[in-house]
Amino acid sequence: MKNNQKTAVPYEEQLHVYGRIWVGIALTMMILAPIAICVYYNAWPPLTAVFKALLGVAPMYWTVGIIEVFTYVPMLGTGGSYLGFVTGNLTSLKVPCALNAMEAAKVKAGTEEGEIISTIAIATSSIVTVIVIAIGVFALGLLEPVLNSPTLKPAFDNILPALFGGLGVVFISKNPKIAAAPLLFMVALFLIAPGLSGSVSVLVPVGVIIAIVVARLLYRKGLLDKPSQDAAEVKPE
């Protein structure tokens, strides 16, 4: 008798298939939006002006985009990475949400549990963001005095530092030996060159590289504590 049962496609392969589809759709929509505007208004910028503008901006974004893939994918997992890169705002929203959710669920990045929690956290943050933006758009007239209030301006200016500060306390306390080197480096760098505070996307991977190098050196010298065995071991089937 012939076996008519279809072989189940592994979950991770499904993520790659759907992830590539949605990334392709998002990229197409991003490209078609300015083209549609140009077609509707019959206003086309000269190609020389477009290439001249891209020459000063695009290389930086290409570099940051490549660095972010190598930095964030190990943290977010397959599903979380596709969803995060499509919806955007990784550094200030998606990555902190995923890390905080994995911390609350007591799972580690790179595991199946971490993959699921990361994807759910990023999906939830995307939905909440859309809802908050929709409310803000419809209630902009009522919220404008609050948003432009001089009293609240310092709070709005420090949302990102407060967010990463709270996460930093949690993760630095786990292994201060590894965290000390990139932390001291960044503090010294910003004291010497305060203008670099706007280059977060580039400096985050720099801190990651410093942490990896320091962790490797400490491990070789036997100065790192052994990883805890609190997670259940996966038994082979």
Image: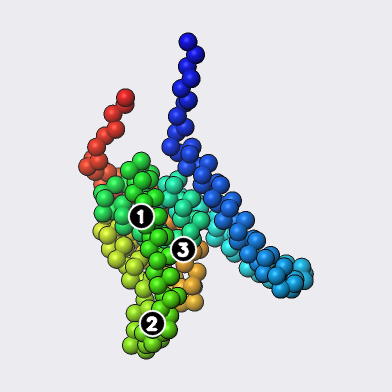
Depth order, front residue of 208/16: 16
Q: Are marks 1 and 2 in contact (CB under 8 Å)?
A: no
Quarter that holds the C terminus? top left
- 172 up-or-down from 157: above or below: above
* Residue pictured at 28% horizontal, 29% vertical: 235
On the picture, is 5 further left or further right than 159? right
Q: Quadrant of residue 94?
A: bottom left
Q: Which mark is residue 121?
A: 1
Badge 3 density bin: few <14, some 14–19, many ≥20, Cα 10 Å: few
Spatial CA distance of label 1 from label 2 is: 27 Å
Classify residue 128 by image quadrant.
Answer: bottom left
Q: Is residue 51 left or right of residue 192?
A: right
Please state which of residues 83 and 193 is positioned toward the viewer in this rendering: 83
Residue hosting label 3? 89
Q: Tell me which label, 3 or 2, sits earlier in the chain.
A: 3
First-in-chain label (1 vs 2): 1
Q: Viewer-proximal residue, 74 or 152?
A: 152
Q: Give the residue drawn at x 31%, y 57%.
A: 100
Q: Which mark is residue 143?
A: 2
What x and y, as percent, mark residue 195? 49, 77
